[in-house]
Image (tube, rainbow, N blue to C red):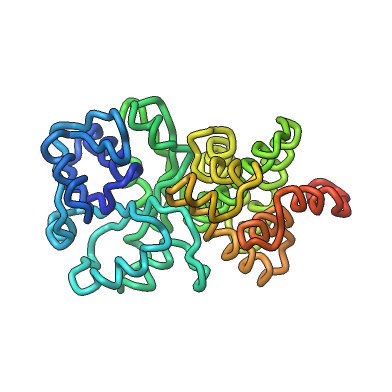
Amino acid sequence: MTSVSVIGSGAWGTTLSQVLCDAGNDVLIWGRNHEVIAEIAKKRTNEKFIPGAQLPENLNATTEIEIALAAAEVIVLAVPAQTLRANLLNWKAFFPTNKPVISSLKGIEIQSNLRMSEVVRDCIAMSDSLVGIISGPNLASQLILRQPAGAVGASTNPEISKLIAKLFKTNYFRVYTSDDLLGCELAGSAKSIIALAVGMVVGMGLGENTQATIITRGLNEVSKLGVALGANPLTFAGLAGMGDLVASCSSGLSRNRTFGEVLGGGNSMNEARLKVNKTVEGVATAGAVLEIAHSLGVEVPIIEAVADVVSNTLTPAEAVQRLMALNIGAEIDHV
């Protein structure tokens, strides 16, 4: 039995905690919201983030971050991506540097353009060999029901990849291993942007032809960018790539797709934020991924269109018109 602390008591942190409990680990979940943590500890529920779910009896909970970090043999990060740096810097004095850290965060940090594993290593003086991620087509509201699903555990250290697969292995959750940390992390971050684009065309009343085109060409853009950064191109055909993209673009449970639908329906960014009222990583990530692409000379017109929409310089309708006006050529070379 491995002692695992999950840092973050939102929908995803709570869901991962259940999977880890089901896999036979000793799990402690941390959150700063005293009411949420008290509810998890006493009632085994988290109605704010996972309504209706009955959590495992052996799931422990705390609001004391020092206790959570000290008690763990392995640390799983499940806080919002754009808050990671501030949290880590606050915890730096007592954050262990000799324990495996697994990030479940999907996003690129704005301003620095760093992936989440890079933010961890930028804030905490720890070896690359102790850092890994878990990523894949995993919607919390379905996984909490123990519906069969798959994911990828990735690290530059194969032992950490194997550790992730072992920690999360249950009869309903299958975790594969990968040494392409960069590719898996980029794919998980960039899919949110493409899901926003799909949501926009859905909100505009456009059908499956348009949606399939956005998904396919969006995957092409993410793959080209990944390869330019040194990722394995096959990663983008796997669970962290195509798998996560399909789930996020196809499901009404996806926050990014839902946010895009609200925008496509004619609402402003402020109106969309009020209506969705949840963390939507694609909004922040779009500009960061676009900057990375520009720095490498990689053309990403769909990602660029989304970045322009969320920065209020383009409407969804204008974005579609711009994309359809692009010069085209061979499918594998140009969008």
In the rendering, at what x and y percent does residue 209 appear?
A: 75, 32
| 116 displayed left or right of 20 | right
**Residue that appears at 39% across and 37% down:** 140
Relative to 280, does residue 288 appear above or below in the rendering?
A: below
Image coordinates for residue 326, horizontal then vertical, percent: 85, 54
- Figure label count: 0
- The residue sitting at 35% across, 43% down in the picture is 12
Residue at position x 28%, y 51% from top? 8
Side (left or right) of 302 relative to 169? right
In this rendering, does residue 234 appear at all? no
Tell me if 95 is positioned left or right of 250 in this view. left
For the point 34% across and 42% down, the residue is 11
Q: Quadrant of the N terminus?
A: top left
- Nearer-the-camera pick, 170 or 13: 13
Q: Is residue 93 left or right of residue 149?
A: left
Residue 25 x %, y %: 19, 40
Residue closest to the eye, 276 or 112 = 276
Question: Would residue 204 be visible to someone looking at this image?
Answer: yes
Question: Depth check: 51 or 219 in front?
Answer: 51
- Seen in the picture, residue 50 relative to 324 is either above or below; the reply is above
Residue 258 image position (x, y, % from top left): 54, 40
